[in-house]
Amino acid sequence: MNSRVVIRRCAEYKTELVQAAVSEAVRAACDWPALVRGKKVLIKINLLTDAPPDKAVCTHPEITRALIRACREGGAAEVTVGEQPGMQLSESPELAFENSGTAAVCREEDARMAPFSRFGYREVEVAGALKLRQLLVANLLLDAEVVIDAAKLKSHIQALYTGAIKNWFGVVASRDRKRSHHLNKLEPFSESLVDIFRVRPPDLTVMDAIVGMEGRGPGEGNPRHLGLVIASTDAVAADTVALHCADYARMNVPHVRIAAEQGLGKARLEEIDLDGPAIADVRVAFELPPRSFTNPPKIVTSVIYRFWSIRPKVLADQCQLCEACAKMCPVGAITMGETAAVINREICIECFCCHEACPHGAIGEKPTMLYRIMRWRERRKLAR
Ligand code: SF4
Ligand code: SF4
């Protein structure tokens, strides 16, 4: 049976516009309000870090507000807004809620604001795991009766793209985020993302694609207007449609492909019924993240993605010696030099956590030879 994905236009983050788009989208995507009536609902947002809404790093607070209101109107018994930001904020996750505008929305709309680490984790066996057989998963996710994936459409330097599936990275404890990052090559890392996602997939995805992020996401890219809200009970299909809307389907994103191969949803447009404008009418070609290629040959996605990588590089003239990258690095590969941070290549696992953590855009990429060859091949193809 085909999956259904709803697209609704929403030009900007005005409360009434977002509310109308989200309310319409959830009603068209599922049996709403029956889904939430009388239930304990968790809205899992994307709060990578403590960035303000205009940076397009986090799920916009107006999306969160609209979802809380839709749940309340639908008769939800309890509404919780949950997330655990990046490891650089593991001691103070509330900062991400405050600075992203989410905390204010939770207070105004009387929803519980819940950094996952404050409510604990428990060990879960992952049936059918590809890489991570046990995971420490947020109690709030496991105990919720209904889970809504309030994802944000962005480019991602390590996973190529982040939307609905990748948003689940936030539901596991730091221990497992580190284990996942240690599988630093794209294909195994993507398999671990699917393991995390399959523990407890969302009942509904509502993606903030009003302003997404292109280029050097998930934290340092440029905001890019798309003007859409995308909703589906199939998160893989929601990601698939989002990829096509941002013209990111040209990258052949491994974690979305693998999730479909694992039977977790649909990743081919022929298997998706669209409700809303045609993709061709809303598509905006987002700038690709650094290690991606347009229409890579199959061998690249299935074999070479297992082995290749790009390396982080400190941009010395931008470094402020703030140490945020050193605190975030899972293997202790960063020390402070006299004028800039220094990466120890011998132990760096190329996870790009430092890129996510750096508040000054001072972690760039050093391409490998293979990467240069592939870029050269791509430029030649485009020139013909
Ligand atoms: S230096 Fe950066 S990319 Fe390398 S292991 Fe540390 S955080 Fe990851
Ligand atoms: S690279 Fe970024 S995070 Fe690391 S010390 Fe320099 S400015 Fe701070």
Image: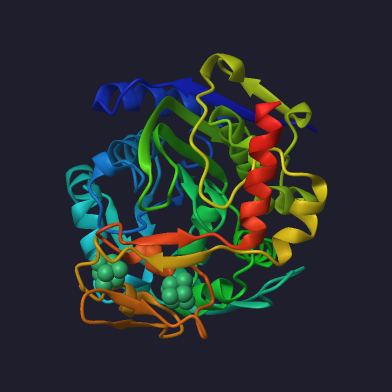
Q: Is residue 272 left or right of residue 171?
A: right
Q: Is residue 222 above or below residue 304?
A: above
Frontmost residue, 80 versus 370: 370
Q: Quadrant of residue 24?
A: top left
286 or 84, nearer to the observer: 286
Q: State whether residue 101 is above or below residue 329.
A: above
Residue visible at 55% across and 14% down in the picture: 281
**Is residue 295 rendered to the left or right of residue 167?**
right
Q: Position of residue 349 (x, y in %)?
A: 54, 77
Viewer-nearest residue: 43 or 331:
331
Residue 339, above or below 27 = below
Q: Position of residue 304 (x, y in %)?
A: 75, 60
Query: Which quarter of the figure is the N terminus placed in?
Result: top right
Q: Position of residue 365 (x, y in %)?
A: 46, 60
Ligand 2 image position (quadrant): bottom left
Residue 90 position within the rendered picture, expressed as x and y whole percent measured from the top left: 32, 74
